[in-house]
Image: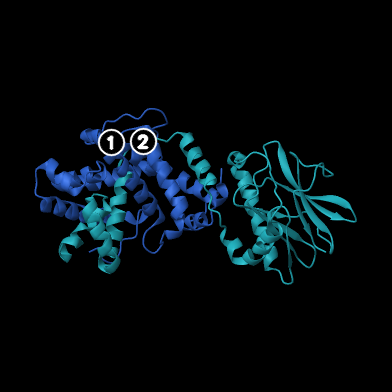
Amino acid sequence: MPKDLAHLSDEALVALVVRSDEVALAELYDRYGRAAYGLAVRILRDEALAEDAVQEAFLAVWRSAGRFLPERAKASTWILTLVHRRAVDLVRREERRRADVLDEDYDVAGGSTEETAWLQFERERVQAALRKLPDQQREALELAYYGGFTQSELAERLGQPLGTIKSRMFTGLSRLRDLLAEAGGEELWKPTESTS
Amino acid sequence: MEADGIHELTAAYALDALDPSDEHDYEEHLRHCPRCREELASLQAAATALAYGVETPEPLPRLRERILAEARAERPNVVPFRRRLIVPSLAAAAAAAAAVAIGLGVWGSSLSGSLDEERSARAAREEVLALFAQEGVSQFPLSGADGTLVVAPGGQAGLVLTGLRAAPEDKTYEVWVIEGGTPKPAGLFQGGGASSAVALTRPVPEGATVAVTLEPAGGAEAPSGEPLVVAPTA
């Protein structure tokens, strides 16, 4: 195990990946692979497709680490954004899977489901913040982020004007940001000055 | 679309929920709008927090293996320090090596190399890189492969080889320092990847020749075959 990189920050690891250091890539995977896979499974509802999405995302990290701007985002945000993008691309190709997006009781075969304390804490924190949102805003965020629906698809599915969907998303995500900041969000990101 | 409308798309963009036609417009807008870039950074962080809001089953170990094997297979051809420090001599070496084929082993066996091997390869790179930084180092072109031999005034030496195929599983490359017709072992390496760096385990006296052969795994006390790579310092 590449223990000798354990003391490095995520951003330092990305800088090493720019120099084709695969031990650094392995360390990033060990830190975020599980969260990445959990997200991909939630979106895709299929282990094989989820593995594909995570693999493509980490290879995108490998190929494009030089374009990562540490002053713009945390490395973990960048990585999970890549994972989300790949998973959403895949789910849009697998049209039929999105119908059951709100069914949260999807059972994953194989692998341990025992989470680390940190992942469990984060999940509870995020879910608590989501519960504080008005139902319609939470629904818009969940269908977009976990379901892979675009704005206009959501408008059609929910029978609402596009403008309504846009503003639910904007208001919902802005409120979520503020709620998470209140709940000690420093572990996940640094709130910018525009957070008010 | 008017500017205010575009601004409101920031949340949907952070959620990957823009329709393809809007996405292009928004990205174009983003390039010219610092306010949206700042807003996007904080909304993207909030959107990413949603990634932690789900159950996290443990992925199977094969996923990690697949990612690392694939990354290794497509390692970029240019290592940054090499580009900065030794491109001129590499060009000279390539010219000298022009017609000599090396024709070795099995392509791709470096894929099975362990991370430990990768780490020692990296340590060797650092050591050779440090050699380049010394004052008064000499560089010599290679015959038989692209690359360069670098020798410090004290005789400490390193080899940098580009595009050398990995040695087969049961073989190793061995470096020799030849003086007065007697080759002495000077280090082992596996090759593969875009470039290999080898810090020689014995000094290279003035006028000596450095050579590389393919030997059984573990190395040999005397070369068993023809040299694949040769670098005279005379």
Determine the chain carrying the residue at label 1: A
Q: Nearer the viewer, residue B80 or A166?
A: B80
Image vertical order of residue B151 relative to residue A101, above or below:
below
Query: Pointer 2 indicates a residue of which chain?
Result: A
User: Residue drawn 64% across and 58% down?
Assistant: B126
Residue flagged by tag 1: what amino acid is it?
Glu
**Viewer-side residue, B101 vs B12:** B101
Judge the density around disc 2: few (<14), some (14-19), many (≥20) Cα neighbours within 10 Å: some
Which disc, if any, is residue A6?
none
Determine which quarter of the picture holds residue A112: top left
Label 2 belongs to which residue? A49
Q: Label 1, secondary structure: give it.
A: loop
Left or right? Give the position of A164 relative to B18.
Answer: left
For disc 1, the marked residue is A94
Q: Amino acid at mark 2?
A: Leu
- N-terminal-most mark, 1 or 2: 2
Using the rendered image of the protein, determine whether residue B128 is visible from the camera's viewpoint.
no
Q: Count residues near mark 1 (Cα–Cα under 10 Å), then give few for <14, some for 14-19, many for 20+.
A: few
Chain B hue? Answer: cyan
